[in-house]
Amino acid sequence: MRKYVGQPLPKTDAIAISTGKPVYTEDLAPAEALVVKMLRSPHAFARIKSIDTAKALKIKGIECILTYKDVPGVRFTLAGQSYPEPSPYDRLILDPIVRYVGDEVAIVAATSERAANEALKLIKVNYEVFEPVLDFEQAIDHTSVVHPEETLTCNFDIGMEKGRNICSTHTLAVGDVEAELKNCEVVVEETYYTQAQAPAMMETFRAYTYLDHNDRLVVVSSTQVPFHIKRQVARALELPFSKVRVIKPRIGGGFGGKQTGSGEVFAGLVTLKTGKPAMFIYSRTETFTSTTSRHAMRLKVRMGADKDGFIRALDIENLSDTGAYGEHASTTFMVCGDKTLPLYNKTKAVRYHGHAVYTNKTPAGALRGYGATQGTFALESTVNKLAAKLNMDPAELRLKNIIKAGETALAYHGKVLGSSTLDRCIEKGKELIGWQEKYPFQELPNGKIRAIGMAVTMQGSGIAGIDTASASLRLNEDGHYNLLIGSTDMGTGSDTMLAQVAAEVLDTPPEEIIVHAADTDVSPYDPGSYASSTAYVTGMAVLKAAEELKQRIIECAAKVLEVTPEQIKFDGRELKTLDGSKVITLRKLAESVVVGTDKNQLVGNATYGSPISPPPFIAGFAEVEVDPGTGKVEVVDYVAVVDCGTMLNANLVKIQVEGGIAQGIGMAMYEEVHYDEYGQLKTSNFMQYKIPCRKDFGRITVAFEESYEPTGPFGAKSVGEVVINTPPPAIAHAVYNAVGARVTHLPITPEKVFMGMNASKK
Amino acid sequence: MQITVMINHRQVTLDVAPDDFLVDTLRQQGLYSVRRGCDTTCCGLCTIWINGKPTLSCSALSFRANGKHITTIEGVRHEAEEFAHFMAAEGADQCGYCSPGFILTVLAMKRELVNPTEDDIVHYLTGNLCRCTGYQGQLRAIKKYLGVTA
């Protein structure tokens, strides 16, 4: 029986952050920090012929104005990834070539925001304007080349052909997919488009920098990846690693967006040039236009099955729009295939292939789901189409074809699935949504139509064989502990949940475990919180560090009590011999090793990386109400049944699911992305880019079918990303079941539904 | 120009520019719970009370607050903490960045609505966006806090 793991404990920082304690980046900055503002390109693709800053420099309070002439010539990537980063080094801090509307042109640093804004208006820039690449389907072999520069480099071959605007190329193929498709009795095909969803975290991007007493550059940033930011800043500013320190305070949301750097290098450059603290806060509009969004994709799917409904062949061709820079381009592309192809493992041949391409638009990057979300929409919509063509119940079709624990799949890289309750998730979800009674649709007396739809999905838990986290746990003088980690609680409650893991091992209340994260001078290395890694990868490091420390405590007590370690029983407070004859309290032991005569402060250290990335699973079910007169869709109920292995904190896991489903509903229905003909992002604030408010969907019902993942901490897998994947295909399916409109181009707007209804009637 | 306002029951006289907004003026006074989340009065993060009414401080000109009572979450700390415990019990605080504005709106709702239904609550709070929670945990917390069963 577990004491702490699984308990719905409140987050340790809950009351402080809810009631406005000044614990976020901006709150902590020194009052005298210079205000950093950016002059941004009005053109999608241009060369700066000249910049005149003379007038702007005369404004009172202007400290410096920096242009491409003032920056180091080394290219780097803002992607926060383990070294060597798969993302190309295709950026300069400031570049004479601007590649999208909103690209950086000149940095202004001033003693006041007013002065900085004034100066921005007075900088005169002359541009030579080029024809931009705006349509990603026309990017390959376009007459304009987004990145012709010789100095662009990749750490390894990602299939880049920059002269053709191809950022990366990838193929994953097992078997002869064309031959197998020919053998299939039923083949369905469809092309899908997913939009460049924005993370839209409530705290926009921000960082401040200063030089400390050792003349080192300190970067305080709202980031998910402090160690990657340290490496990125060191490279971009040509500083030795030892001269950079990155601190992450509380973060106002990330969702993957803050796995990519933003203002750190700009503020850092100002601090290096002026010697003064500097802070760069992105406006909401800048966050939309000039930080990264989800990769928009076009996915062409062909799926073949035999007459019994076994899926035998699957081919997905993907074209991904990485925008002006290649952050996370090759990896989101790969994840899209890796988290979709293995789901149905009765296949005889599978293939996933295509390119990520450069365009002159806002760069794409990491966002919750990281390619899997896009892939799930395409795959699951196709499975639903197949079910319709086979005249089979889509839930039955899935139960027949899904991978199960102990099995492998053609595209599962020779690994065996360690845990899954996806079959039970589907059964439970059917029950909760009322599948038997409601599928496929019912007409309501008011003329509206209620219908249900479904989708399933998988993600991963950390990046197999790459991401490696360390944890350090220290026994203090009175018996409480410090847990040092480098993962980044961005609101998820991971600090609390990791304390629960350590507390379980050490048999001590979690409040006795003081968690510190993250400061690259203090924390042990951790890639940061992304790729659904914190519970699983950092969680295992914490578990192992706690086990090691526990063993040391026992050994130390054995020495003091003059018995062997095997004779000691530790209940978290006392160390007793098995026969009960000798005892020492943890407090006494701690006192003697830390401040007393034994002189041996006990520490547990562990480093963990996993050779596998165990997938969590979800079965998602949407109930919608469609007005056939207008095409308006309402999500009445959404049921998500989740297999994330063991729940480490029942409440925090549930909220992750509810929040992820809401974000998925946003992607499915509300979050449209539009550019004008000149390449300007029109949907660059919350007026134009609509994230769901609390009236925009009905009930969300969450249930769990726990599995036990043998390689995870107490059987846990991840939950952070998988939760966003099912709403787009499940809602699209429900809409189809309601009115026959098959929406393949996200988001599912009333216009598309209405047009689709009329098309299906013809 | 000079204004005299009551901020959290304390009278202060401030120098403000004609185009200063309260969100900035209040932050300059060290009230860091007041936050800017958007540029378009859409998100509710910057919610404060002016004479007890929830108001978006990002679009409220500071000079217009002359002679008025301003309340931020720091001014109702005890009551805010009481509700925050209900949020924490649901795990519904998450990143916490929207919470001060959200909680101030909840506390204003408590004063304004008598026996609100679930629909009333959702309607009242529509202007407070949250990207983390999907709103469900917040609703559970409010219903328990107010003893709403409908």
Image (cartoon, coloured by chain):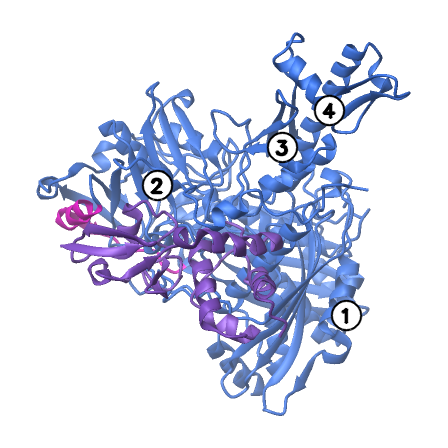
Chain colours: A blue, B purple
Q: Residue furthest right?
A: A579
Residue A183 x %, y %? 75, 64
Image-based side of A25 in relation to A32, left or right: right
| Residue at image mark 2 | A263
Q: Write the start and end of the magenta stretch as one range.
A: A113-135
The chain that hosts pointer 1 is A
Q: CA distance from mark 2 to mark 4?
A: 42 Å
The chain that hosts pointer 4 is A
| Residue at image mark 4 | A550
- Depth check, mark 1 against mark 3: the one in front is 3
Cβ atoms under marks 2 and 4 closer than 8 Å: no
| Residue at image mark 1 | A431
Q: Residue furthest top?
A: A597
Q: Which corner quadrant of the image does residue A467 belong to?
A: top right
Does residue A496 show up magenta in the picture?
Answer: no
For marks 3 and 2 on the same chain, the one whose residue lies earlier in the sequence:
2
Image quarter (top left, top right, bottom left or bottom right) of the C terminus of chain A: bottom right
Query: What's the residue at 78%, 65% (across, down)?
Result: A427
For marks 2 and 4 on the same chain, the one whose residue lies earlier in the sequence:
2
Does residue A114 show up magenta in the picture?
Answer: yes
Q: Which corner quadrant of the image does residue A585 belong to?
A: top right
Foreground residue among B71 and A682: B71
Q: CA distance from mark 1 to mark 3?
A: 41 Å
Identity, as a three-letter code, of the amino acid under mark 4: Lys
Residue A311 x %, y %? 75, 62
* Residue A330 higher or lower than A423, as above or below: above
Image disc number at residue A561: none
- Depth check, mark 3 against mark 4: the one in front is 3
Crowdedness of circle 1 by 10 Å Cα count: few (<14), some, many (20+)?
A: few
